[in-house]
Each structure stands twice: as structure tokens, then as C-alpha cells.
Amino acid sequence: MISNDNSAGTGDSNYNAISELKRNGLLLMTGAEQRALDKAWTESTGLLLSVLMEQAASAVTTLVLTLLSTRSDSAGVGSLAEVALASDEVRTAKVIPDLSVDAARGMQILVLAGMGQNGGDAWATARQLLAYDLSVSVVDLSEGKVLPPEAAANRQAYLNLDGVVVTANDLVGIEMVPDVIIDGIFGTGFQNRPLTAELNELLAQINRLGERAGAVVAIDIPSGVNADTGEAILNAIVADYTVSFGRPKVGLFSAPGCLFAGKVISAPISMPNAWQEQKLEQALGKDRTIHLAVTKDWLSSRRIERCVDGNKGSFGRGLILGGSPGIPGAVILAARGMMAAGSGYTYVRSVPEILPLLLDALPSALISEVGTAAELLQLTGQLEAVACGPGAGGSDWLHFLPNLIESAAQLVLDADALNYLADLSDWEILTVRRAESGLAPAILTPHPLEFLRLAPDLEERLKADRAGAALALATRSQSIVVLKGLATVTALPSGVCLYNTSGNNGLAKAGSGDVLTGMICSLLAQGYKAEIAAPAAVYIHGLAADLALQKLGTARSITPELLLDYLPQSFKQVDW
């Protein structure tokens, strides 16, 4: 059988496992982590925060000039966002483009500067943009307030260069449509709190103006979005681009914050990665939550080579356990997802009533009825992975679930298996015992309603912080929780949250999750560790939907069956 040591581990082994997960990953950062690094940087270098502020402003300036150059070279084309989004994704902005004075004349830049360091970044950006003979106006939201020293210095420098300052009232009934709006109102320290009616109206007005502007660029985080959770207030700024300094902020990859971020640009500042890790561990400890965005680079570096002379047994044996009278489709889709993801053997066990349908739909699968608990456990003892739940309804075999939790080498629980689990008062004890016995953590794949059935006490947490809620359940149940939905998050009991960056609303169809369940089971059967198999399957599944969208031109017509057709291309794109 394929060896797959998924034991959770403790101490140094757990730390090493987390370090391995970070490799080639896009690490994300909370507001507290950013502030800890800023403090450590000034102490380590002896330099002022104004140096970092200048670097941050340079990154924003570079993007703005790039957008303006694109527009000046593309007369008659749509908005700046439309022009730039047609090109490859921008990850870093390093080269200042040559924007001619003639092209720059008449281009309008509206900068919104708040009361904190984010406002200081905005003032510094506005000052830099003056050098390009652009028409720059700053809405000063700090009037009468005491600014941090670095922000105050940049504000004064802008004023000393005769920079134009306007008030929020000056925007009422404005006819000028800015070429670029720069949002520097709130920063990473923003928490959801009541705003004044005037500030709420300003945010709404900026969003209305942003719909007509060439592009809206947010500094570090769109104003009104929580940098740690992605929670967004009413009228949070909707950006086309967000320039995030150092590491991107967690809220840019969490739902619903990802809907406000636009394209995220990671702008390096003078903090080496290894140094950041060292200082974060010193300030916050080794046990802090690690946030990681799942990308193609991360996946490509984790491929298990498929041996050219392999046989069926080389690529794993997995079981899909599900289906019930009137619901044969779910188990069929899960089995097809398992096959498309590359497993050598696909076993299916279901109720007798639908076996003829399954045999007709899945000619290459090994299909039979569930049988007795002893028969099922004898089979699962010979397999690398088991997935339970798709279309199971209220099948009697669900009573075998505690036995499977205790014994299956790799286990994925979805749909009706989760609903059955939720009715067991001691289900978390079962999954904890499983992990303590040395078996791989169970993988739970709930959508939000299933999640609340499993953990009704986390309802308020789920509303405000999806990843935090998923991690809380993963930790106490010692299971891997794949919380499905926009920006699906995979939470590991070791304290790692992985955020998916693929997919679209074409996945919001009955059956899509069944395909995903089969894919996760397939990767487990092939030898991928649970903490890799779950987020990898989520990403590749979402990428298939993105490829279908590119071909169809609409997400509306994407079906689970169509996802299966695009899985080969999806695997190819991640070099698997």
C-alpha cells in the first residue's frame, strides 16, 4: 500500500510540518503582524518609519503611473482597470514608466488621506505624483486632528510644494471624473465600528465616483475592510487594485474582503522574508496562526511524480460511500471526480436500489452494495482513502460512521455524513481520538449551513470571521475543515489557514461539491498528505471552473459535469 504518514505531530515535528507548508507559498499577514514588524524594523535598523512610508508610496506611485501610461497608449479603450486586467497579473511593481509631460497634462488624480499611517502613505504618494505634472488633489480627512509624525511630515511636505487640498464637501456634485482615485482613508488597524453619517456618505460617494473613474487604487487594504478577517462595512471602498506592502493582508483573500480588493499587488519593502519570520516568532510566538494563499506556484512544487511504469495499484485505491434512492447523481459525480483526479482504483458502495444506475454510469468503477459493517470495514482496511456522504440521505449504513472514523486510513466526510455527524453529541470526541491514535485527521467539507449544524456555537464567529470559525472547529475537533464558499478556506488543526484563489460562482450548483469530495479522496489515495490534498483539490476544482468560464464567456452555464471535462486542463496548468 502507498505510504502516507499524516500524523498531526507535536512540538518540533508540528513546527517542521508548518515550515514545509510555507515553502513557495504566498504568506499573508494580519494587521498586528504588520505593526510588530514595523516596530522590529525601526529597532533593528535604527531608521525611521518614514523610510518604509516612502517605499510604500513609491510602490503606489509606480502602479498609478503604469495605469496612466497604459491609458495614454490606449486611447479610446475602456477604463484603466479593463485595460490592465487584460494583461498578465501584476505581482510587483518595480519600474517607473516613462510618462511624457504631454500625456500627463490633464490627468486627474484624487487622493483620499485619512488620519493614520495609511493617510501618511497617501500624502507621500500625492507628493511623489506632483513630480509628473499631474493634476493631484487630496481630500484631507485629518483636518483638526493630530497625525502620527511621519504622516504629518508628508502632509506638510505636500503643502509646501503647493499641492492642492480639498474637503469632502468639495466633492458634492463634482463633475470631474478622476483618472485614478487613491484610497488612503483607513489602514490595517481598522475595525468594524460605527462611522459618522458624513464619513459613510463620503465612502458611498467615492464608490459612485469610482464607477466612472479610470481606476481605484487602495493603499494596503480597501477602506472599510478588516485586514484580519475580510469583514466589510457598508460602503467599504471597492478597489480595482490594492497595493499591499510586504506581505498581502489576510482580509484581501478572505470573503467578503476579496470582493473589494480587485487585483492584489504585493510590493516588497525592506524586510527580508527570513527576517520577518524570525521577528514574528519573537513577537507573537511559534504558535501564531499562519495564513497562506494557495497559488499555482505552491501547488506545482508539491507534485508527486506519477511513475511511468506504474500500474493501477501504484496510483491508489479509494472508496466513495454514498447515494440513496432518488439521489444517485451525487455519488456518480464524486466517483467521476475521483477518477478524473487520477486514482488507480475507484470503489463505490451504495444502497441496492441504485446499483443498476451506478453500474451503467460508472463502467470502470468497482461497485457493490454497502453490506454489513464487518464487510465494509474489511474493505476500507485495504484502501488508502474513503469518502463518505454524497447523496447518502438517511441511509442505514451511516450508523457505521463512528467505526470508519476510528479506522479508515484517510477519511473525507461530506454532505449527509456531516449531517449525521452533527446529530452525534460526541462527534468531536471521535475525531480527536482518531487524531490521537496516529491516523490522519479527518477532512470535513461543509458549506456554511452544514458548518453551523456541526458547530452552532460558532454562528457569530462565522458571520464575522470565516477563517477564524473554521480554525476554531479544526482545532477543537483535530480535523481539517474545508469551509466551502467564496474564497474557500482550508483550516488545519496545526493552526494554518489556506485561502483558495481560484473559482467563480459557476460552482454554486448542486453537485459541484460532490466532484470536489471525489477529488480530495483521489489525491489522498495517491499519497498526498491530507493538508496538501484538501487545498490542492479545492484550487484545481476552482481552476476548472475558471477555465470553463474563459471558454463559455459566462459562469451561468457551468455545470458539475462540465467541471469534469475541464479537470485535465486544470491539472495541466498546475503542472500535476
Image (cartoon, rainbow, N blue to C red):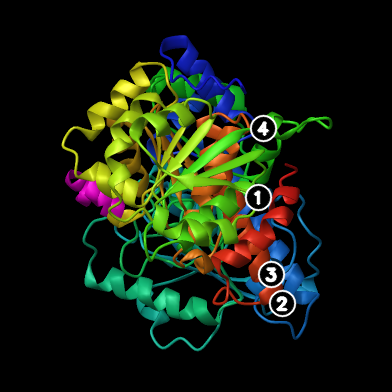
- Per the image, is 461 magenta? yes
User: Residues under labels 1 and 3: Cα distance?
Assistant: 31 Å
Given this view, does label 3 or label 2 mark the residue nearer the observer?
A: 3
Which residue appears at 29% of the width and 32% of the height?
Answer: 402
Q: Which mark is residue 364?
A: 1
Q: CA distance from mark 4 to mark 2?
A: 50 Å
Pointer 1 or 4: first along the chain: 4
Label 3 to label 2: alpha-carbon separation: 37 Å
**Dots 4, 2 in contact, CB < 8 A:** no
In the rendered structure, find residue 302 and report the number of the disc placed on it: 4
Q: Start and end of the magenta stretch?
A: 450-464
Name the amino acid, label 4: Arg
Question: In the displayed structure, does residue 331 sit left or right of residue 361?
Answer: left
Residue found at x 53% / y 30%: 383
Which of 329 and 351 lies nearest the eye of the viewer? 351
Near-viewer residue (299 or 99): 299
SS type, badge 1: loop
Q: Are marks 1 and 3 in contact (CB under 8 Å)?
A: no
Q: Residues within 10 Å of mark 4 (few under 14, many from 20)?
A: some
Q: Amino acid at mark 3?
A: Gln
270 to 78, vertically: above or below: above
Residue mark closest to the camera, 1 vs 3: 1
Foreground tag (1 vs 4): 1
In which quadrant will I find the N terminus? Answer: top right
- What is the magenta segment's predominant secondary structure? helix
Q: Residues within 10 Å of mark 1 (few under 14, many from 20)?
A: few
Q: Secondary structure at mark 4?
A: loop
Q: Which residue position holds label 3? A: 550
Q: Position of residue 548 (x, y in %)?
A: 66, 67
Outermost residue on the right side: it is: 308
Dot 1 and dot 4 residues touching (CB under 8 Å): no
